[in-house]
Image (cartoon, rainbow, N blue to C red):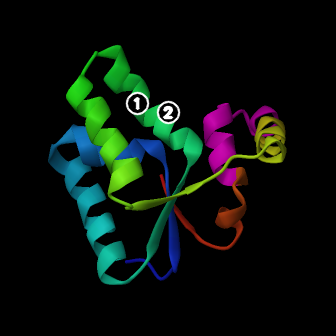
């Protein structure tokens, strides 16, 4: 399945894992299980935390907010990568040049992606 040592996981995959159910949740579960079994580190950006919390806050679902907080802050599942101004500037340039949303461009401009796999 994956041969990387680190796997960057985008917000949509985490949302599928937590909220989706069905085939999307199953696929995310398979990838996370494979990563754990093969000692592949899961990394994501600090912005991903906010992206995951948006829907929970929109629906005023406090248990979902608490679940995401636990996932990101207490369970130590993901290594959170800080987002630097330089990364945002690169993402903005990429977004403009490739007709991408800023958040999607940000994912491809994160330094770990130059050397590791991405699951989005």
18 and 77: which one is in front?
Answer: 77
- Taking the spot 32% from the left edge, 25% from the top edge, the residue there is 56
At 32% across and 58% down in the image, what residue appears? 75
Give the residues in magenta.
Answer: 95-108
Residue that numbered label 2 is attached to: 50
Tell me if residue 60 comes above or below residue 97 in the rendering: above
Q: Residues within 10 Å of mark 2 (few under 14, many from 20)?
A: few
Secondary structure under badge 1?
Answer: helix
- Secondary structure, mark 2, is helix
Q: Is residue 31 above or below residue 120?
A: below
Q: Which mark is residue 18?
A: none
Give above or below for 7 relative to 2: above
Q: Position of residue 64 (x, y in %)?
A: 25, 32
Q: Out of 10 and 101, give the one closest to the viewer.
A: 10
Q: Please name the residue that numbered disc 1 is placed on.
A: 53
Main SS class of the magenta portion in the image: helix
* Count of numbered labels shown in the rendering: 2
Marks 2 and 1 in Cβ contact (< 8 Å): yes
Write the residue at 80% across / 32% down.
96
Q: Residue 61: which quarter of the image? A: top left
């Amino acid at each position: 399945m994956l041969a990387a040592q680190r796997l960057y996981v985008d917000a949509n995959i985490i949302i599928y894992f937590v909220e989706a159910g069905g085939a999307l949740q199953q696929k995310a579960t398979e990838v996370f299980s494979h990563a754990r079994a093969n000692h592949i580190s899961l990394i994501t950006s600090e912005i991903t935390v906010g992206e995951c919390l948006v829907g929970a806050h929109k629906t005023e679902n406090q248990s979902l907010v608490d679940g995401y907080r636990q996932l990101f802050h207490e369970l130590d599942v993901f290594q959170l990568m800080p987002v630097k101004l330089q990364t945002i500037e690169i993402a903005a340039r990429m977004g403009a040049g490739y007709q991408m949303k800023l958040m999607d461009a940000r994912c491809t401009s994160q330094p770990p992606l130059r050397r590791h796999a991405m699951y989005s």
